[in-house]
Each structure stands twice: as C-alpha cells, then as structure tokens.
Image: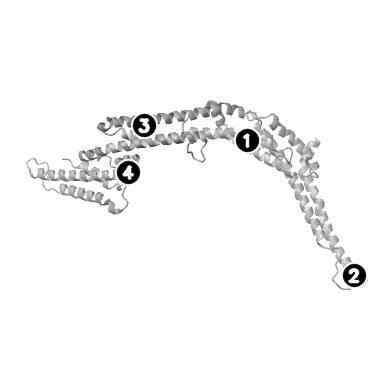
C-alpha cells in the first residue's frame, strides 16, 4: 500500500490549524488529539521498517501491512464518530455542510461514508423543515417586509426576498450532491417540490415589486422634471414672498431606488436611468437652490420697514430674476447652472448689504449707550464755591465733548461703509 496520499491528507489535516468546529474547550479536542497521535505513531512505525518493502520474498511485510491497514480503519471509525457528533451539534443545515466541507477528501472513505449515509436522511429532513419555515415567513411578511432603515421600500423588499431565497438555495445545491438512495425517495421529491414552490413564489413576488415600481416611475421621472425650480411657500403666513425649492420628493425616492436596484442587478427603465445619470447634477442644483432660498427668505424675515428703502432697488431686481425660476424655468431647462450662479451672486450681495446695515446700527447703539452711561454733571456730596464748581464742570465738559466728538466721527463713518458695499450696484444701475 502506498502511504504517501494518506500522509499528505494527514499533514493537511493536522497542520492547517483545524479544530473541531463545535468544541468549546481544549478538553473537547482530546478525540482529535488522540486520532492525531495514533496516526503519527502508525506512520512512524511503518516508515521505520528495516527491510526492503519491495522484496516480494519477505513475508514479514504482509503482517506489518495488515497491522497498518487495521490501524487506519480504526482511525476512520474514530473520525466518523467525531464527524457524526459534530453533525448532531450543528444548529442549521448550512453549518452541517460547512462541517462536511472541513473534512473534504476524507469523507469518501468507505467507513466514514457508511456512517454519514445514516445522517443524510436527517440532513434532508432538516432542509425540508427549513424550506417550510422560510416559505411561511415569506407569506406572513410579504405585505410588510423587514428592510434596512436606509433602504428604499421597493429595492429593500427585493433584497429581503432575495435573502430568503439564498437561505434555501445555497443548501439545496449541497443537498443535490447527497446519495442517490436518499434523493430518489418520495420524501426527497416532496421536499424538492416544496423548495421549487417557495422559490417560485419569491421570484414572482420580486417581479411584482419591480413591475409596480416601474409603473410608478414611468410617469414620475418625466412629469416631475417639468416642474418649475421654485414655488411660493404656502406654509408661511407671517411674511410675504417666502420661497421653497420645488424638487418633488418622488424624484428623491426614484434616485434612491435606482441606486439600490443597480446594486441588485435589476433592469432599470430607460427614463428612470436617464434621470439617475443626472443625479449628481440635480443634487448640486438643488443644493445651490436651497442655499439661495434660505438666504433670500432670511432677508425677507429680518428686513425692517425702515431698512427696505435702502435695498428696495436691489431687492426688486433680485425678485425679477427669481420669477424666472418660479414661472418659466424647470429642471430640464438649459443653462440652469449659469442662472443659479447669477442669482446666487445677487442674493449674497443683498444679504451682505443688509448685514452691514444692521451691524452699523448695532455699533451706533453701542456708542450712544456709552454717551448715556455718564452724566454731564457730577456732584461729590460737598458744598462748592461758585468758581470751584465752574472749574470742575468745565474740565468734565471738555472730557465729555472730546469723547462724544470721537464717537461722532465713528458714527459718521458707518454710512460711508454701507455706501462702499452698495456702490457697485448703484454704479451699475446708474448706467
């Protein structure tokens, strides 16, 4: 007998860091260790023979070879017992097949195969029970499937159904490799039929979900992109002219669904695919419009009646530009980015002017508050002669006049700073 294949199997088995998959402590590994020690001793004894094993006249070889074969068979019986015990500890069908894969190459031995044939029927029945359980779970949850929080509803439902399919498809591929005596029984035929029925129901469910989504997107992508860029915000009742971005939430849902459907290799309608290809452009455009609308609405909410004349001309010019987005331009219009750049520049300038005005008013209030913090007349609670009081008052008056004069210069500089900010616009309008 050629012992090299067995030695290679033994080395692959003992040096690969293998450990009995379902043991919990080193004590549980004793069967494996005993198997390994016996195997090593058996091979060492056989390799230590002093005579020529190719000598056909040497009768001692027959006895030694018989001892070796007996030891190998005993090792196979031990290994079959270990695999059988591991099979009993497997909680799922998939883990049972993983156990068998761990001993690949050794399962074909006659003694081990005989032990495992007894467990193949149990494995088939466990798979059948798993198929029934998955099918019941599918029927109970298909109206409201459990999907990830960040997944869109349609793509999430498809992913959920595929997850259930994979749960029974992968073990079924392994099941087909079982013994013919097991797979040709009536019980195996019934389990295969149940598997086929469950798989067909889940595939039909996936097709229905995708078809329903396609029917909704056929009208969504074309109609929603024809909507104007902006619209008045009817929720605002205190301030007139408040705007909001007119990007329909259905388009956001469409872009998310297409993204996840592509990951699932689902065919996407042409119209929806065109919209998805513009997804990054639409994201940038809606982001710029959000910034424009927030800045413009903040100007309207904070603008006081006394401040309106100072920015009325620029505000009217800005409103003319915004009317294009409210009544004329839609998401399919040309040169949207150029338009957004122009409006963004205008709304930022109005916001900056209004900020400068309000900031100057606040600084002026602070200076005037300093004037009111000190009295023009100070008395220290004693009696003054007329000339003494006049001298003290004159000194105080001079200090106060100097401080007020300096503050007045700062107050006069504030309108000049506002004029500097608004002068480019005034110059352009004068032309």
Gap in angstroms between the C-alphas marked 1 and 3: 49 Å
Gap in angstroms between the C-alphas marked 2 and 1: 72 Å
Which color mode does the image show? one colour
Q: Position of residue 186 (x, y in %)?
A: 28, 30
Residue position marked by numbered label 3 in the rendering: 195
Residue 263 can be seen in this image: no
N-terminal of the pair, mark 1 or mark 3, is 3
N-terminal of the pair, mark 2 or mark 1, is 1
Residue position marked by numbered label 2 in the rendering: 389
Q: Position of residue 278 (x, y in %)?
A: 57, 31
Q: Position of residue 113 (x, y in %)?
A: 23, 38
Q: Quadrant of the N terminus?
A: top left
Q: Is residue 40 left or right of residue 417?
A: left
Gap in angstroms between the C-alphas marked 4 and 1: 55 Å
Residue position marked by numbered label 4 in the rendering: 90
State which mark lies toward you, 3 or 2: 3
Q: Residue at x 62, y 38 (%)?
A: 287
- Dot 3 and dot 2 residues touching (CB under 8 Å): no
Q: Is residue 203 left or right of residue 109?
A: right
State which mark lies toward you, 2 or 4: 4
Q: Nearer the viewer, residue 144 or 6?
A: 144
What kind of element bears circle 4?
Answer: loop
Count of numbered badges drawn on the protein: 4
Residue 285: which disc?
A: 1
Q: Residue at x 22, y 44 (%)?
A: 7
- Dot 2 and dot 4 residues touching (CB under 8 Å): no
- Dot 1 and dot 3 residues touching (CB under 8 Å): no
Q: Residue at x 6, y 41 (%)?
A: 57
What kind of element bears circle 2?
Answer: helix
Gap in angstroms between the C-alphas marked 2 and 4: 106 Å
Q: Nearer the viewer, residue 63 or 34?
A: 34
Q: Is residue 97 left or right of residue 65?
A: right
């Amino acid at each position: 007998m050629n012992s090299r294949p067995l030695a290679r199997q033994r080395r692959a088995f003992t040096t690969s860091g293998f450990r009995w998959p379902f043991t919990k402590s080193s004590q549980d590994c004793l069967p494996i260790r005993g198997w390994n020690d016996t195997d090593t001793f058996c091979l060492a004894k056989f390799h230590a023979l002093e005579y020529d094993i190719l000598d056909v006249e040497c009768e001692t070889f027959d006895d030694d070879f018989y001892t070796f074969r007996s030891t190998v068979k005993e090792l196979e019986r031990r290994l079959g017992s270990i695999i059988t015990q591991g099979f009993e500890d497997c909680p799922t069908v998939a883990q049972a097949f993983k156990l068998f894969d761990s001993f690949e190459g050794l399962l074909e031995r006659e003694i081990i195969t005989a032990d495992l044939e007894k467990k193949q029927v149990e494995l088939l029945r466990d798979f059948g029970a798993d198929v029934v359980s998955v099918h019941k779970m599918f029927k109970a949850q298909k109206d409201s499937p459990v999907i990830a929080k960040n997944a869109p509803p349609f793509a999430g439902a498809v992913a959920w159904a595929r997850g259930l399919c994979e749960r029974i498809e992968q073990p079924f591929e392994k099941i087909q490799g079982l013994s013919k005596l097991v797979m040709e029984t009536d019980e195996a035929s019934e389990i295969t039929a149940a598997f086929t029925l469950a798989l067909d129901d889940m595939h039909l469910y996936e097709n229905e979900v995708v078809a329903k989504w396609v029917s909704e997107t056929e009208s969504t992508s074309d109609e929603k992109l024809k909507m104007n860029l902006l619209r008045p915000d009817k929720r605002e009742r205190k301030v007139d002219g408040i705007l909001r971005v007119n990007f329909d939430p259905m388009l956001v849902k469409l872009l998310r669904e297409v993204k996840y459907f592509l990951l699932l290799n689902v065919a996407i309608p042409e119209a929806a695919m065109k919209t998805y290809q513009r997804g990054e452009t639409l994201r940038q455009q809606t982001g710029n419009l959000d910034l424009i609308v927030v800045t413009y609405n903040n100007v309207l909410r904070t603008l006081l009646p006394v401040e309106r004349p100072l920015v009325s001309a620029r505000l009217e010019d800005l409103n003319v530009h915004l009317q294009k987005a409210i009544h004329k331009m839609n998401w399919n219009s040309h040169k949207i980015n150029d338009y957004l750049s122009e409006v963004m520049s205008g709304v930022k300038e109005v916001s900056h002017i209004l900020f400068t005005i309000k900031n100057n008013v606040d600084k002026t209030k602070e200076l005037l508050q300093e004037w009111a913090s000190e009295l023009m007349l100070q008395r220290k609670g004693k009696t003054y002669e007329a000339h003494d009081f006049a001298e003290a008052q004159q000194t105080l008056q001079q200090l106060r006049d100097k401080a007020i004069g300096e503050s007045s210069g700062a107050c006069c500089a504030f309108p000049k700073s506002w004029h500097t900010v608004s002068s480019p616009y005034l110059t352009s309008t004068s032309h």
